[in-house]
Image (cartoon, rainbow, N blue to C red):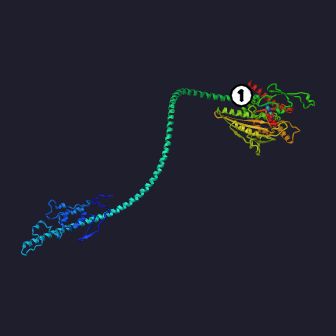
Amino acid sequence: MGEPGPSRIPSKLPLPPQRKVNGIPRPKPGPVSTLQSKRITRRSMSVPDLRQMGAAPTNQKQPATRAPTQRTVQPVNRKRPAVTATAAPVAKKPLVQSESNKSSAKPASVNKAPPVAAGKRKIAPWDTKGQLDLANNKIERLLQDKENLEALTHDAQAVKDQLDACLKEQALLSSRLEEAQQKRKETEMHLIEAQNQCDSLIADKSALASKIELLKSQLTAEKRKNEQLGEEIQKVECSRDELISVSSQLRKDFEKEKSSNLELCSKLELTETKVKSLTEEVLELQELRRQMHNQILDLKGNIRVFCRVRPPLETESGRAIASFNFSDEASLEIKSSQDPGSAKSSQKTKSDSFTFDKVFSPNNSQDDIYLELSQLVQSALDGYNVCVFAYGQTGSGKTYTMEGGDTQETQGMIPRAIQTIFSAIDKQKQMGWQFSVKCSFLEIYNEVIRDLLNPKSNLPYEIKMVGSDDVMVTNLKVEEVQSAEGLMDLLSKAQKSRFVAATVMNHQSSRSHSIAQIRVESSHAGRNIQCQGTLNLIDLAGSERYNSDNLTDRKKETCNINKSLACLTLVIMHLVEKSGHVPFRDSKLTHLLMPSLKGNSKTLMLVNLAPLEDCYQETLSSLKFATRVSAVELSARRQIKSRMAMKSK
Ligand SMILES: Nc1ncnc2c1ncn2[C@@H]1O[C@H](COP(=O)(O)OP(=O)(O)OP(=O)(O)O)[C@@H](O)[C@H]1O
């Protein structure tokens, strides 16, 4: 709070009211300054009084040791040197003496004159010397008074100066007081701010304390984690060391392998070139095989006839079984004790022999049939059009042969062909072949086409020519499939859609021609080969003859079925004989199969026979149909063979 400077007076010091002494304003005596008060009272003081205060008298009786300069009044407040400065000259002069003290205050020289004060002796008028001394004394006293007056004037001037200084000081102190008050206010404001800050700091402190607690708990958790990590690091370091040793071992092994790898690389290159040339060879051989395979089939005949006799069923126990004799794999003899033309037929035995490309007895499995049929599937993959017909009377086993049962063993020709197609595709893809497989399933019932992949459709299905050789069915769904499973799914969908009606012979008999068409397109970019073959697997409707007992609906069905079967027979005959006009358009069946029947196509007629005695006539009828087809084909084959023999000569 204190300020540097020569006048460090407390700011609370009350300033004295100004009053005039002898017309000069002077400060009120008081606690302001001891020196001031002493000077003010000095007027009324006698010289001894002044001596007591330390002032130096002019009287020579004063002790010599006390020089007037030594009477300097010591200021009470050392901080006020201005007062001290003014006091010194005052002390040099003797103060005004009171009348009572005049005699005692008389100087030594004055004392040499007759003492005036002691009883005021009368000087005689003649005593000139005495009067002179008295006048001198008076002069001296007056001089003394004058001197004192001057001292007082000087003193008053000093007091005035001091008062001015005090006033200045007062003004200074007032401004300082204001400043101090201002500062106090500011300080109070600062204090309030500081208090507020302090409060917020206290709040912050408590928040920080809770944070610290939280952080401490986190720190503890982190420490725990850290410890766990430390343990894990140790483990990892251990395993790292192990890995380093393994790695160095592996590096050594790698170096070894690298050198052997180089050898292998050169060997691999050699092998790759070998594989390339072998692939070329394989492709050439495949081409050769294709040609040979189809030449063989040509030799076997483009229209071949197989005959299959199904075994008697459990449901047929008790019924008479016709007698079949299978002398070799291509011949069949059938005996019957019945002769419908004779009244005594039971007494006569009739025997008929037939020869076909293949004959299958009731003992032959689905596998045996497919072994022969698979060659035609291969032909379809090679780009030929193939038709496989299942022919026979109702209940003879056509559907069983084509579609089969649920087990692997009883699986029919269609699912087996599907498996063959896709396994062949998988193999040939590795040789650079690309394939596309599309399929459709339809049936012809009473000369009307139904889409088995869209059975509820009422769309019209018409057979239309595409170009000069191909046909298509309007609105028919043709699905592209990528796998055997996809095709099997479509097959089962088609099977469910087949028109099924009860017949006398077979309660689940199908009275329609069912046609599964599988079109395989293949290409080999490297060899610039493109092939397209269609495999038609046809489950014909039952071929039983017209019977007067047939119901009206059945009569119409039978008529249509027989008409289309007769048409098929006729077409086949024309094809084999290479007649100019082939009546393809006489039935929906032959019209649809036209692209697959004509040209370089291959056809298999699979005649199915029931073993029952009472089916003898129908069996005989089927065998005669098969013979007709086979006989024509045989004669054609003989012609081809003789032509080939001629060429070789
Ligand atoms: N080789 C066979 N082995 C065992 N059972 C067979 C064989 N062939 C046919 N069957 C059975 O004979 C019955 C009739 O066969 P399927 O339905 O195949 O005759 P279908 O000729 O198709 O008759 P439809 O022309 O009326 O359709 C079926 O129960 C079938 O399982």
Percent from the top left, x then y, of residue 75?
A: 24, 61
Percent from the top left, x then y, of residue 638?
A: 79, 27
Percent from the top left, x then y, of residue 355?
A: 82, 27
For badge 1, the amino acid type reads Met
The residue that label 1 is drawn on is 292
- Label 1 CB sits under 8 Å from any ligand 1 atom: no
Residue at the far left: name it.
126
Q: Which one is in front, 275 or 167? A: 167
In the displayed structure image, the side of residue 227 where residue 538 appears, left or right? right
Q: Which one is in front, 99 or 121? A: 121
The answer to whether residue 282 is visible is yes
Q: Residue at x 58, y 28 (%)?
A: 268
Q: What secondary structure is marked by label 1?
A: helix
The answer to whether residue 601 is visible is no
Dividing the image into four quarters, tell me where ligand 1 lies.
top right
Mark 1 nearby-residue class (10 Å; few <14, some 14–19, many ≥20): few
Rendered view: 524 above or below 166: above
Rendered view: 14 above or below 628: below
Q: Which one is in front, 174 or 133? A: 133
Percent from the top left, x then y, of residue 499?
A: 79, 40
